[in-house]
Image (spheres, rainbow, N blue to C red):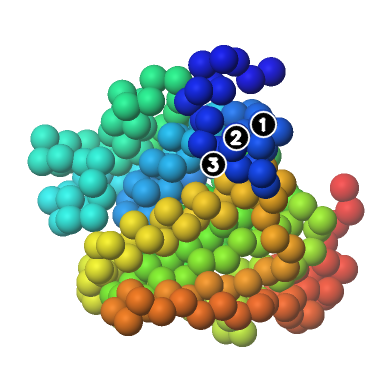
Amino acid sequence: MITDEQLLRYSRHILLDKLDIAGQEAILAARVLVIGAGGLAHPALTYLVSSGVGHITVVDNDSIEISNLQRQYWFSDQDIGEAKARVLCQQLQAHHPHAQLQPVVARADASLLQQQVQHVDIVLDCTDNFASRRLINQVCFNAHKPLVSASALVFAGQLAVYDFRDGHGPCYQCLFEKEMNDKGSSCAKNGVFAPLLGIMGAAQASEALQVIAGIHPSGCWLHCFDAHHFQWQRLQLAANPDCPVCGQTALSTKPCG
């Protein structure tokens, strides 16, 4: 049951016909896993926390560096060398005392992800490399958990929601016929436009909140954003029957139970 204080705090959400009290109550009860505490996670978490998400776990094993401060705005010079996940949760908690934030300072390997994903309602992939995205995609598919995945490099951003609750694709792996690697395609080598991360991270929060509230439109779409020309492109995704994660061959070879 929503309280009087919550009615006031989230009144602008509740006034939305599509959201209403039922949608806000779903947000308040939600459990969210955010993987990565960098440039995408900062805006994503800002809106998830301020919107009242009930419980958020943040997984990241990196430490804060001076080069992060250009776009990871919850960090300051005094935080350099500290754990990203811990500082980010502390900063958000200070601004939103009602929030329940749990930092996990550890590498998001298969074992940790399998443990964490089973306890949440939705996952946000805020990582910056193909290997992590592929692994997160696989674990979320196996666990039938919706995944909001985003990326940002130079002036280009991508975003998609993969809703695995019905046990089928498309999935992140469907986008790639071959194994991708990060050689020559990292922010450290190519750079990234700081506001682009704000746009894509906020978009992740928007998509996640709508999934949680049960108002997200059907279908799977890849949203591509060009920050230099401020242009969006939307492409509908279809499941790849030969996908090693969600394709028919992969599904038929998975053990039962």
> Up-down: is 228 above or below 93?
below
3D distance between C-alphas at marks 1 and 2: 5 Å
3D distance between C-alphas at marks 1 and 3: 23 Å
Q: Label 1: which residue?
A: 21
**Residue at 70 percent of width and 60 percent of height:** 217
Residue 184 tag number = none
Where on the picture, by quarter, is residue 118?
A: top right
Where on the picture, by quarter, is residue 230?
A: bottom left
Q: Label 3: which residue?
A: 33
Q: Earlier in the sequence, mark 1 or mark 3?
A: 1
Label 1 with label 2: CB-CB less than 8 Å? yes
Q: Is the residue marked by circle 2 packed among few (<14), some (14-19), or many (20+) residues within 10 Å? A: some
Q: Earlier in the sequence, mark 1 or mark 2?
A: 2
Q: Earlier in the sequence, mark 3 or mark 2?
A: 2
Three-letter amino acid code at disc 3? Leu
Q: Position of residue 124 (x, y in %)?
A: 53, 51
**Residue at 30 percent of width and 41 percent of height:** 84
Question: Looking at the image, which is closer to me, 33 or 235?
Answer: 235
Label 1 with label 3: CB-CB less than 8 Å? no
Q: Label 2: which residue?
A: 14
> Up-down: is 65 above or below 168?
above
Three-letter amino acid code at disc 2? Ile
